[in-house]
Image (cartoon, helix red, strand yellow):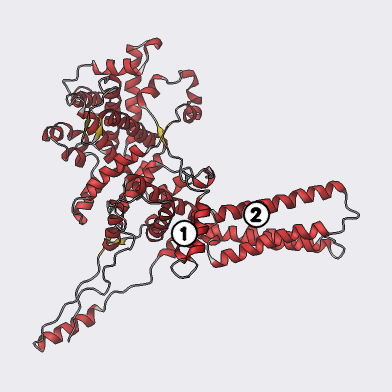
């Protein structure tokens, strides 16, 4: 606000000093009005986008609840009069969204995706400031998402996160409202009028170079305004607002035609689609592989430069595909299919591999592998399973051409997807520590101790020409591991290198089935990180292209796998016929 007042004061002073002989006073004042409106909108956007204001805007009206004292007094009076108090259901009756389960497994078109996403955005935006939701809201959301395909569920999630991004990082919140449209029209009108008034002005006495520069600046301002108008018209907000207004007006035909026209520029399947309008997140999954990282470590003399170039050298990404989302969705939906109450929700949210192992086909899997998730903290578990996955991946050649399938899908795909999840989760722990700060514990210490032990082992065993991932994994698995490392080394070092080798050898006993086990465990580890990451950190990632873990977080909430559902209305009040 101080900056706005300072700039306004300086501009007013300059205009005042140019009077009374200023031939450009009309275009100057028009541009001044348009600029003031835009600057004010920017200040207001920054003010409203702060978490403090956002939280305040979502606070409900004070609710003291029913008059408990009066209800109990009436109840006692009825009992003394020997009249049986009647019970009635809460006036806060359960309501079911018209969106929930409305179309079964029917695929959603782009218009419906935006409409549904906007509906849930208006309800669940309070997630970012820890608003607690009712079980009615949970049930409605669960019904809708459980009846969708994985692809459609993620399309809705992507659009919903896009609304959240616009809320915090663009002017959408103040542009897409009646006053926003009014002031935008005035701003555009002033800038266009400023250009027109300068164009018709008698320019006698002005230098040609100055005139050309002024034309260039004015044309740039007009072009920028119309480009912004195009983005506003083609935004999800415009489509959602028109869709919402169709309920209250008779111009359904015209509104529908306009929406269909806009979707031609947004739908990924449309030949007219513009990537800048249709893309809602990066659709990439970053990777960070520990063994590869240590085999290609920098020489000691260049270690001071290591941190500077680490992100560039190891910034490997793989594209997100629908099969990846399908596996995540099916696993989360399997969890959501169990009867959910406060206790079961807490247990499911606390599971970090235990639930997946306990719900495998055989009890043997659970008995052998359960200690690797139950008896260790999250960061240790993540490192254990990451190294074990890499070891199994590099020594396994049987599934490369495998065509056999089981009920969970193609084994070779489970192998590839397990590695993607493994490298992604380590990337989150090492490169995005703010997202894992709640669950990582002493993860950084474990990581550096494991790196140190790995470096020592590789330096003793390999020359540079032999340093391949496959050779490294074979050499690690050749080490005898009959005795637990902690019994030999003590617990001063937090390295988990050879504990992971033990886990990999146990996994190898299950043959091809190990890849199904690994993929399910990794989905659960991903879900645990997603639901325990602070909502504020999820919101921050939206400005950087988004992360898969953020999509998983919101999907888990929509499937009821969150502890932010606690509200139940009272069910009893006294009444007399």
Quadrant where the N terminus sits is: bottom right
Task: Give coordinates of residue 29: x percent, y percent.
Answer: 75, 63
Task: Give the number of callouts.
Answer: 2
Q: Nearer the viewer, mark 1 or mark 2?
A: 1
Q: Give the residue at the far front of this rendering.
A: 253
Depicted 472 relative to depicted 164: above or below: above
Depicted 87 relative to depicted 443: above or below: below
Q: Residue at x 38, y 51 (%)?
A: 108
Q: Secondary structure at mark 2?
A: helix
Q: CA distance from mark 1 to mark 2?
A: 22 Å
Q: Residue at x 50, y 67 (%)?
A: 251
Task: Give coordinates of residue 529: x percent, y percent.
Answer: 32, 43
Depicted 208 relative to depicted 194: above or below: above
For the question of whether residue 49 can be seen, the reply is no
User: Mark 1 or 2 closer to N-term?
Assistant: 2
Q: Which residue is mark 2?
A: 225
Q: Are marks 1 and 2 in contact (CB under 8 Å)?
A: no
Q: Residue at x 50, y 27 (%)?
A: 309
Q: Nearer the viewer, residue 501 or 242?
A: 242
Q: Give the residue at the far left of this rendering.
A: 82
Quadrant where the C terminus sits is: bottom left
State which quadrant residue 363 falls in.
Answer: top left
Q: Which residue is mark 1?
A: 240
């Amino acid at each position: 606000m101080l900056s706005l007042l300072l700039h306004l004061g300086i501009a007013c002073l300059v205009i005042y000093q140019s009077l009374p002989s200023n031939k450009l006073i009309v275009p100057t004042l028009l541009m001044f009005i348009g600029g003031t409106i835009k600057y004010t909108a920017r200040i207001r956007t920054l003010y409203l986008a702060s978490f403090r204001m956002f939280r305040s805007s979502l606070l409900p009206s004070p609710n003291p609840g029913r008059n408990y004292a009066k209800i109990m007094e009436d109840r006692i009076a009825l009992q003394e009069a020997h009249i049986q108090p009647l019970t009635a259901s809460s006036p806060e009756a359960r309501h079911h969204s018209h969106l929930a389960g409305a179309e079964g497994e029917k695929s959603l078109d782009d218009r419906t995706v935006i409409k549904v996403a906007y509906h849930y955005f208006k309800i669940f935006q309070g997630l970012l400031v820890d608003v607690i939701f009712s079980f009615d809201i949970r049930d409605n959301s669960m019904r809708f998402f459980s009846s969708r395909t994985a692809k459609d569920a993620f399309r809705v999630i992507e659009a919903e996160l896009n609304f959240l991004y616009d809320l915090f990082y663009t002017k959408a919140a103040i542009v897409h409202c009646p006053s926003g449209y009014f002031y935008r029209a005035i701003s555009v009108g002033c800038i266009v009028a400023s250009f027109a008034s300068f164009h018709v002005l008698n320019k006698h006495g002005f230098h040609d170079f100055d005139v050309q520069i002024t034309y260039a600046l004015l044309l740039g301002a007009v072009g920028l305004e119309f480009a912004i108008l195009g983005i506003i018209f083609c935004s999800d907000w415009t489509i959602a607002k028109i869709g919402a207004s169709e309920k209250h007006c008779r111009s359904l035909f015209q509104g529908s035609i306009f929406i269909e026209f806009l979707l031609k520029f947004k739908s990924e399947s449309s030949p007219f689609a513009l990537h800048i309008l249709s893309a809602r997140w990066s659709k990439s999954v970053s990777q960070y592989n520990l063994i590869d990282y240590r085999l290609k470590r920098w020489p000691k003399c260049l270690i001071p430069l290591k941190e500077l170039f680490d992100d560039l050298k190891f910034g490997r990404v793989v594209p997100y595909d629908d099969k990846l989302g399908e596996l995540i969705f099916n696993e989360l939906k399997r969890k959501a299919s169990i009867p959910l109450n406060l206790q079961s929700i807490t247990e499911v949210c606390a599971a970090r591999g235990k639930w997946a192992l306990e719900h495998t086909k055989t009890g043997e899997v659970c008995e052998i592998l359960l200690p690797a998730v139950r008896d260790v903290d999250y960061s240790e578990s993540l490192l254990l399973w990451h190294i074990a996955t890499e070891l199994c991946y590099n020594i396994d050649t049987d599934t490369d051409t495998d065509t056999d399938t089981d009920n969970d899908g193609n084994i070779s795909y489970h192998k590839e997807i397990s590695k993607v999840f493994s490298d992604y989760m380590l990337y989150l722990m090492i490169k995005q520590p703010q997202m894992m700060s709640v669950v990582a514990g002493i993860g950084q210490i474990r990581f550096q101790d494991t790196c140190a032990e790995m470096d020592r082992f590789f330096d003793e065993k390999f020359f540079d020409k032999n340093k391949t991932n496959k050779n490294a994994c074979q050499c690690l698995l050749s080490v005898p591991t009959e005795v637990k490392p902690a019994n030999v080394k003590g617990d001063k070092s937090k390295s988990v290198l050879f504990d992971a080798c033990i886990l990999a050898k146990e996994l190898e006993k299950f043959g091809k089935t190990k890849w199904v086990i690994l993929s399910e465990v990794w989905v659960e580890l991903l879900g645990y990180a997603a639901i325990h990451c602070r909502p504020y950190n999820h919101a921050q990632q939206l400005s950087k292209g988004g992360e898969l873990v953020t999509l998983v977080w919101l999907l888990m909430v929509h499937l009821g796998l969150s502890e932010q559902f606690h509200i139940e209305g009272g069910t009893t009040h006294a009444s007399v016929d």
